[in-house]
Amino acid sequence: MIRIRRRPSKKKAKGHFRAAQQNPSHNTLLSKNLEENTQFFSSLYEESSDVVFRSFVVGKKGATIIYIEGLSDTQKLDEQVLETLLDKNEFDETDFLLSIKNRLPISNIKKISTFSTCIDSIANGSPVLLIDGFEEAFSLGLVKFEKRSIEEPQAEGSIRGPREGFTESLGVNTSLLRRIIKDPALKMKTVHVGKYTKTKVVISYIKGLVDKTLIEEIENRLNRIQIDGVLESGYIEQFIEDNPYSPFPQLLYTERPDVVCANLLEGRAVLMIDGTPFSLVAPVSFFSLFQSQEDYYERFWMGTFVRTLRFLFLAVSLFLPSVYVAITTFHQEMVPTDLLLSLASSREGVPFPAIVEAIMMEIAFEALREAGIRLPKQVGSAVSIVGALVIGQAAVQAGIVSAPMIIIVSITGIASFMVPRYSIGLAIRMLRFPIIILAGFLGLVGVMLALILIIIHLSTLRSFGTPYLGPISTQQKNWMQDTFIRSPLWKMNTRPRLTGEYNAVRQGANLKPGPNKSGE
Amino acid sequence: MKKSILVMLCCCYLTLTGCWDRVEMQDLAIITAAAIDRLEDGKTRISVQLFIPRAITSGETGEDPSLGSTFVREATGENLANAISMLQMNVPRKLFWGQCKVFIFGIELAKNGIRKQIDYLIRHPGPRDNSFLYVSEDEAKELLTLVPPLERYSGEALKKLTQEEKGMGSTLRDVDKALMGESESVSIPYIQMLVSKEPTRKLHETIPVIEGMAIFKKEQMIGVLNKKETRGLLWLKDDMKRSTISIKLKDGDGEISMTPTSGKSKFSPEIKEHRWIMNLNITIEGDIVQNETHLDPMDKDVLLKIEKEYETALKERVAQTIEKLQQKFNADVMNFGRRFHQIYPNEWSKVKDRWDEKFPEVEVKIMVTAKVRRHGYIGPPAALPRDEVKE
């Protein structure tokens, strides 16, 4: 049944895509005749009320400016372009185009000659100036559109550290990077993705630090993508991952310029996508998903402590409910007597088996969390109050759920927020359920089975060719320096091997500060 | 398609193989202590103390605290296994032995032999190897019905009393190993009900306490060491930390008491010209906790005198216990046999079969070194004018 319904629709989609690509008119050159050109554009932009065609005469020649309302700076267009062109001063007839170019007070002005570049230019907000009798047009760089100002990143807050976050406009984001890394070795390569959105994707990297083949590989993977549109970095992420079926993220996303720069400096590449504040970092390892920017900004003791805590709570959020289920249904003799008696007292009268109770409560918690994100802010607090009251207290008093289960679920919930990267938090949240089921069927054996399966899976994963279990599985020197602990900055003299080995030395040796070293 | 079938098959496996020993906590009858008695007609009676899990509701204390949080249920059978299966028929939930850390044998049973019962308890996967065994002065069942005022149930009180001093308790594993080993004898704490003299408390609101040590030889109980002798036995087991020792000096007018802070007993067996000798070196360090005399323990000579006195006092105490074990009971509870076996394997193999005859002949040489480390917060005797302090 399903097959029959699916196949034709698939074929249709493919065919449709091809037909659209083979539209011949796009790559043809502009015609000399202004009439023909405007004819083409107006037919292209028919039924588009926001596209403005302004025809006028300049030096006895007909001319047309085409732009889209709201994307271009109309004030400058009026005052600087039209005023100059409509001026009665004569233009040099021998080299008409050059004289126009010289008269226009615009820094970013380009000569273009094909229809497709014209369309791109118009779509990006640069008005196109067509002049009769020439096969070339001008793209006037007067892009101006409404954009959000730079704000503090919402999803990645920090106490200490820069408060700037990326915005939706790519130009702002790249400028933020340039403001931090001033060396011209910072490169930005552009690839366009999306048939309709034509989204700009910038691959940025530091030349000399990054592996050239990595950039090639990223470009190849990006060029493979043939989709309608890119609305968020997630679209790109899902098309360039190494293992699309894995629950674990193989790229790191961030909206913080400082995080991006730190990764660039370690020899990784960053993909910045127009239209979203999130950029992608590749390649990443499991351990880099547990690094937060503040680990490096605060003293290394604190960084190390917090990081240890994170791994501890990773284990808690993955295994606590399942261990509880396993112990209370299979291994009651493992619990200290007093604890068991307390557990037995609170479980008394609860109508559900422990596994059902655990799954029920975890689902309820996930639902509350999801509802908290989706709901309008004003209602959100109400939901959390109702959730806390109903589930926390009423359910226990009514004897439907036992109190220890509530404690377990809330600890688990808090633990899953300890992970600094939301994407891996999602993976952990999801994996919890199969582990609970395994624990309910097989006890601690099931929990161990799940742990082994997860470790096997993690060790098979790769992110752009580098092993996911990072410096540990590859047994490299100094593997400890930035995984479970965070070494002092003056001690981390080398870049991480797999990404930074092309330029391994990061800083001078013997940087350890001390009272006697100031005069050196 | 193939993959999805595989996944479905895997899910089926889960439901087919797992869960067979899964028990929800609401279906468990948690045994906190068990008592095994021998009835007059030779049948075995098992009584278990079961925990009543009551939902803890805040602020409601309507129940009579003297009822306790446990109840006792019993069953009789031809043997222990039989009795327990009969017991299961009287309990609606599954009997759960995993947390039962206290087994009490009635004195009748103890005198008759405990081997058969031990076999069941060791063989069955439920009861713990490290649960403690006791012998009760009377019917063991009675002790289960006590409601301790402090602890949740009497088994817990007993367990905590035993854990205070490690050498005191004998676990199931210990007893099994000792009866299997060279000496074929073991000591098990001998307990009885503590009589509460508080008028407001009911008679059963009390706990069982350890009164001495029941000495077993070849699965049968042959006698009891009293409290003082038990202390001596603890020295022999290298585990004496808590009890104070009091001595009386010749020229003193009262006693001086010391609490040991650390002590060590070292056994070195020796065979000299067919004389079997056991050298026992005891070192003890302690703090003075009470000084009834007028002597100043800060004085060096007094201190030396005190230490000397302790050495003889301790020596006497240990000698007394050994004497009783060797001559009266002829039970090698301290495991001398094993120590000889380790060092003199050839000689041991000759006397192995008649160790019973040899054991009372073993000479025990006791050497005690005592050291007073601290004399408490004060130096000279308290509440005494300085000029009355004797040097």
Image (cartoon, coloured by chain):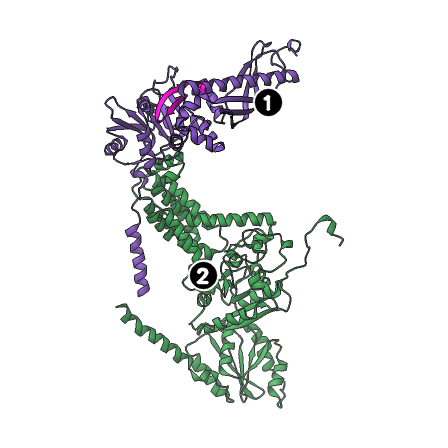
Chain colours: A green, B purple
Query: Quick check: can you spot residue A374?
Result: no
Residue type at mark 2 is: Thr
Asked whether residue A504 appears in the rendered view, the answer is yes
Q: Position of residue B273 (x, y in %)?
A: 51, 25
Residue depicted at x 64% and y 61%: A505
**Closer to the camera in the image, A491 or B236:** B236
A64 relative to B100, above or below: below
In the rendered structure, which amino acid carries the disc numbered 1?
A: Lys
The answer to whether residue B259 is left or right of residue A354 is: right
Give the residue at the far front of this rendering: B273
**Label 1: which secondary element:** strand
Residue A107 magenta-drawn? no
Q: Nearer the viewer, residue B181 or A473?
A: B181
Within-10-Å neighbours for mark 2: few <14, some 14–19, many 20+: few
Q: Which residue is found at the position 31% from the left and 34% from the top?
A: B120
Quadrant into which the N terminus of chain B falls: bottom left
Assign the C terminus of chain B to one quadrant of the image.
top right
Residue, far bottom:
A94
Which residue, given by chain and number where applicable, does mark 1 sit on?
B371
User: Is A329 displayed left or right of A410 in the figure?
Assistant: left
Question: Quick one: SS at disc 2?
Answer: helix
In magenta, the rendered stretch is B205-229
Please give left or right for residue B279 compared with residue A92 in the image.
left
Q: Is the magenta stretch mostly helix, strand or loop?
A: strand
- Tally of marks: 2
Q: Which mark is residue A460?
A: 2
Position in image of residue A350 (x %, y %) = 31, 40
Magenta-drawn stretch contains B219: yes
Chain for disc number 2 = A
Depicted A199 relative to depicted B88: above or below: below
Distance, label 1 to label 2, CA atoms, is 64 Å
